[in-house]
Image: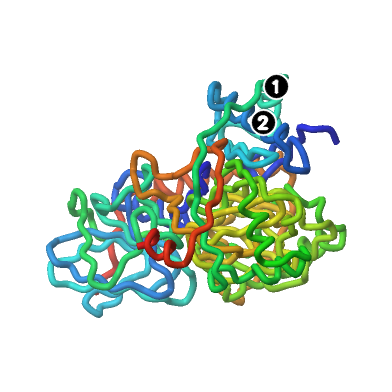
Amino acid sequence: MAFPRFRPVADHAVLVEFSDAISDAAHGAVLRLDRAIAAQPFDGFVEAVPAYVNILVRFDPLVTDHDVVEAALRHMQTDGTAPVAQGAMHEVLVCYDADFAQDLAEVARLTDMTPEAVIAAHLAGEYRVYLYGFAPGYAYLAGVPEPLRLPRKPVARRGVAAGSVIVAGPQCIVTTLTMPTGWWVLGRSPTRILTGESARPFLFDVGDRVRFRRISREEFGHADG
Amino acid sequence: MRFGVPGSGPMDRLSFAIANAALGNPDGAPGIEVSVGGLELECLAGPVTVAVAGGGFIVTLDGVRSVSWVVLTVQQGQRLRIGPGHWGSWTYLCFAGGLQAREWLGSVATHALSGSGGGMLLPGQVLSVAEPHEVPERPIACPAIARPRALLHVVPGPQDRFFDGVAMAALLAEPFALSDAYDRMGVRLRGPLLTPVARLDMPSEPVARGSVQVAGDGVATVLLADHQTTGGYPKIATVLADDLDGFAQLRPREIVRFVAVTPVQAVALARQRAGARAQVLAGARRTDRALPPGM
């Protein structure tokens, strides 16, 4: 089946897929469709939720249906190849001390690196904000260097603390809640993604860039205070 | 959901809407969701008219038992107590004139995990009604469509391709029980394992309320009001929105079955049921019923 694929979701949404794997081209297509819908929403449009390679388009089933929405979205498809504008750069602090990094040793074992090499590899990445998801303020950053990419665990670890820096595949997240996760916990950050400011409640915009800077436990204490 | 914030709001949207309708409140006026943990409120200044709807909870005013679904006026100094009864997991306490509540992102709904929005209530907290007024006391009819729902209509997908025919057949043929792992995010089911046959390497993607998500171990979870907005585990099927209210009223160990419908049938069912809902809400707004004697 050729891309884009339109997959029906229950009685109220269509999932539009541009690829099976994360790529700048697929995410660009997602952002272009997202903007096209925002510029000219179809009758019965409720919300669009963009992600890495696909976008969930929610609709009111009392007004429209899957086929009509699919036709409207196909009509919006442009051949646009305009590059996505460069986003702002943010620095995020991270402490890799052992009690913050429950999975560092296991990641080192699975990637055949020393823990210090794992940390260096994580710091070397330049990350981009691809989407928010999962829970409030969970910004999905893509850009984990190749040697560090591991599939997520088959079963989640419960009670992973807010502020944890977690990775899976090419993705990295600074968590905002204490929650279960199947991702690998590499460290903890005192940088607040949920800013608490009503004018700008979320630190990043989709498309922004992020670099991590290593801090000591002592600096973590100060920054977190 | 664009910034990772789910819709949240009531687990049983129909019962919540009935409680507001019975008071003549606008749709979605702030109210309180009460779990089987129960709630006790003392009226510090009154009178305050309230409505309770959802589940079969035990409602008492100064120790005198009322029917479960009811409009009551509480006088200053009286204590209203709501506790679990024969059935249901959630009930709704709404106030004539609406509750004053904190807004976040343009809503007073509470995201339970983060405490964002209106917020979870704490012992000793004082609540205020925005525009208090009295409404005639009366019982509220509990319509059949607000009863627990054990047959859930699903549209297969959007990641049914991660599963073989055996798993899909098991989902649609076998009974599943709700487990104790049940909160506002979702409920894990006990039943046959629906082990994915494809590698779990899909990029995290948006998920909808009602998703039947399957982890690598084959255990299915139905995602509910405070669900994660994206996830990387495949969704074998998605439950229709209207079935989720009654589903949320089931309790752990109760049984559900899934039946597949096409997207066209799903939309037709949604439209048919929207009509039934509108009738129920119109009925709840009528004030010409009386409480039985002794109330």
Residue position marked by numbered label 1 in the rendering: A81
| Residue closest to the eye, B257 or B294 | B257
Q: Amino acid at mark 1?
A: Thr
Q: Which mark is residue B13?
A: none
Q: CA distance from mark 2 to mark 1?
A: 8 Å
B143 left or right of A117? Answer: left
Please rate how many residues cluster around mark 2, counting C-alpha atoms within 10 Å: few if below 14, some from 14 to 19, many from 20.
many
Q: Which mark is residue A28?
A: 2
Dot 1 falls on a residue whose secondary structure is loop
Asked if residue B98 can be seen in this view, the reply is yes
Q: Residue at x 52, y 41 (%)?
A: B2
Q: Amino acid at mark 2?
A: Gly
Q: Are marks 2 and 1 in contact (CB under 8 Å)?
A: yes
Q: What x and y, as percent, mark residue A110?
A: 77, 67
Q: Residue at x 20, y 57 (%)?
A: B128
Dot 2 falls on a residue whose secondary structure is helix
| Residue closest to the eye, A152 or A144 | A144
Quadrant containing the C terminus of chain B in the rendered view: bottom left
